[in-house]
Image (spheres, rainbow, N blue to C red):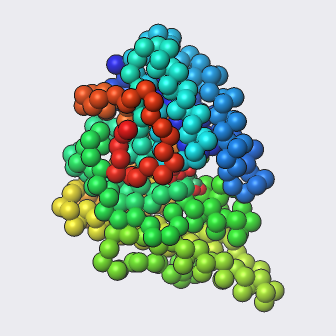
Amino acid sequence: PVVLGIETSCDETGIGIVRGHTMLANAIASSVEQHARFGGVVPEVASRAHLEAMTPTVERALERAGLRLADVDAIAVTAGPGLSGALLVGVAAAKAYSLGLGVPLYGVNHLAAHVAVDQLEHGALPKPCIAMLVSGGHSSLLLVPDVAREVISLGSTVDDAAGEAFDKVARVLGLPFPGGPHIDRVARDGSGAAIAFPRGKYDDGTLDFSFSGLKTAVARWVEAREKAGESIHVPDVAASFQEAVVDVLTRKALRACAEHGVQDLLIGGGVAANSRLRAMAQERCDAAGVRLRVPSPVLCTDNGAMVAALGSDLVAAGVAPSRPDIPADSSMPVTTVNV
Ligand code: ATP
Ligand code: MG
Ligand code: FE
């Protein structure tokens, strides 16, 4: 079956089309430039941009896939979590396509979709696997027996998400929004060992994370140098901050694998695009005998193919479609796969 996926939880209007685990199209329209001068996503601006981009992006995806609307067998849509108004635009559009085409509707969890997308490149997920989801709004370690049916939370951040920490530290360093990719780029010219920033909850025996102490430590460090009239070497600060985040993330991910006797680790979400995280995770997985899967960077950040991928799994698993009146749920828990 051909599944069309609609993603509008934040500032990307993503339309993906998949058949099984084969990606046929992944069209994205982003309103990120409209938000940049505000230093963060403005919900009303995002909703309006989704509305304007919806039809053209669906058309672009169909064209790339070489399909017509009549070829679509099911619609999947991000029902949460995310910005309420932004989600509503996607959910309303999905209902309209589902009703108009007479095909089933699947409301899915954006976070489970960040996990499911990896199958478009690397085949079916091992059952079970450990998934580390690191994105703009979430940082969680998950035990995933079957992404279409059950996701179990093992731990999560007690304060900031990893991506949020990247974005806030980037702002302190005067880098543009969203800062994650800029820190990644700038850090290549610096040393991760230059400054010893704190690693929150490093050996606390839990699978939780904490990044707000690190963020504050970086801000204080920069402030102190500026007050003293000293110049700072931005690449060293970026690299040392990044090293601290990546060290904690990979340590806890491997701890989760060991505690649960699982040899397969998947990393997903926007921060999984980070080059240092990908490299350190590979090194530590190799040393521990754990198989690592990370989607290509374009599939780590928000897109429609991830939603279609999870929808496709739900269809294949024979999971009942959603009711036609599903709500958007801005705070959907990570353990709710579909609604
Ligand atoms: P959520 O998935 O929690 O709802 P979101 O959808 O807004 O949040 P994603 O698109 O999954 O977030 O991820 C965006 C986040 O990823 C941003 O915080 C961004 O800075 C970060 N990010 C993207 N690329 C990189 C990178 N190369 N290095 C570090 N962080 C990155
Ligand atoms: Mg975005
Ligand atoms: Fe996301």
Spot the residue most to the right: 229
Q: Is residue 98 left or right of residue 282?
A: right
Q: Is residue 338 left or right of residue 239?
A: left
Task: From the top left corner, tell me how far across and down residue 328 is, in percent.
Answer: 50, 40
- Please identify the quarter of the rendering in which residue 226 is found: bottom right
Task: From the top left corner, tell me how far across and down residue 27 is, in percent.
Answer: 56, 29
Task: From the top left corner, tell me how far across and down residue 239 is, in percent.
Answer: 58, 69
Residue at 59% over, 33% down: 89
- Please identify the quarter of the rendering in which residue 146 is found: top left
Of residues 320 and 34, the one nearer the viewer is: 320
**Is residue 299 at all visible to an observer of this figure?**
no
Residue at 70% over, 80% down: 222
Spot the residue most to the left: 261
Q: Is residue 234 left or right of residue 226?
A: left
Split into 4 quadrants, where in the image is the C terminus? top left
Please tell me whether residue 19 is drawn above or below residue 148 in the rendered image: above
Split into 4 quadrants, where in the image is the N terminus? top left
